[in-house]
Amino acid sequence: MARREFAAVVLDLYDTIVRWDPAQLPILEWQGRQVRSTAPWLLPRVRECFGGRIEPEAWLEAYHAVYREVIEERDAKSIEITCQERFARTFARLGIADGALHQIAVDLTRLHMAGVRRITSSPEERTWAVRRLAPFYRLGLLSNFDDSQTGQEVLFDTGVSHLFEAVIISADTGLRKPNPKIFEQMLARLGIAASQILFVGDTPRDDIAGAAGVGMRTAWISAGKGAWPEGLSAPDYVIGDLAELPALLGC
């Protein structure tokens, strides 16, 4: 018999339902190093648009500098900055003013995200777990992902998207977990008390501390994550993989 202290289960997406394999990314030779990156898929489009106006090395330096700044800004403020905005800021950093920049940023986003989608998979045991939960609990999905279209496509690729009553992708809201406002949006979508929701995710700060901060119960997916960070309140449950959740909940 499923445990009925919960009316709903809300899941994270990446490293909870799906996994992505960066080892499938192409190798970029840059600054004397070999790094896995989507950049080799993007640079032909940059060359096509700008020819000799932008050297590949300059574009890469600007892009990585902007990426670091974006990470710092979104982590400090718990806000989302979209992939498209990241490309737009890269061109601004290079001092490029072109009426077609908006479309070029869109094109680069689509190229980048197509690559991300290709190397993302949904393990069968995890989609089985979602199907097993669905008859007993209302399901929600809350994901930190910087492109709404691809977030929805990745969820669709799992074959279980139709089982989710409420789906929130951070790119749609301008907010990122652990910002309490994005969790509150999920509460509003489901229309139930936080104490009736079990939130399941893999990141201690964003997923577990964020959900607990609005009163949700939590289950941490711990495999490959190391020790629980000091200073954070422990999750209510610890599992190694989403596949273990149905047994934990008795369904």
Image (tube, rainbow, N blue to C red):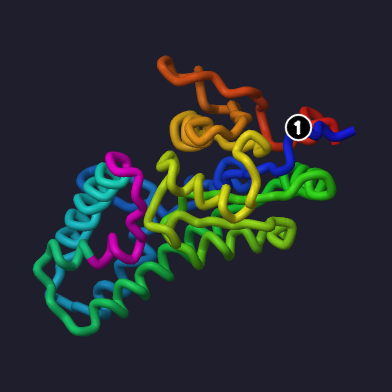
Image-quadrant location for residue 6: top right
- Which residue is located at x 43 percent, y 47 percent? 181
Q: Which residue is mark 1?
A: 5
Q: Position of residue 215 (x, y in %)?
A: 55, 32
Residue 82 on the magenta span: yes
> Quick one: 29 or 223, which is closer to the camera?
223
Q: Position of residue 166 (x, y in %)?
A: 63, 57
Q: Position of residue 162 (x, y in %)?
A: 72, 62
> Which span is picked out in magenta?
75-88
In the displayed image of the protein, which residue is found farthest to the bottom?
99
Q: Can you say whether 140 is above or below 46 in the image? A: above
Q: Can you say whether 184 is above or below 156 in the image? A: above
* Amino acid at the residue labelled 1: Glu
- Which residue is located at x 15 percent, y 70 percent? 54
Is disc 1 placed on a helix, strand or loop?
A: loop
Residue 130 on the magenta span: no
Picture mark count? 1
Q: Can you say whether 180 is above or below 227 in the image? A: below
Q: Position of residue 70 (x, y in %)?
A: 27, 50
Q: Residues within 10 Å of mark 1 (few under 14, many from 20)?
A: few
In the displayed image of the protein, which residue is found farthest to the top?
230
Q: Tell me the chief SS of the magenta region.
A: helix
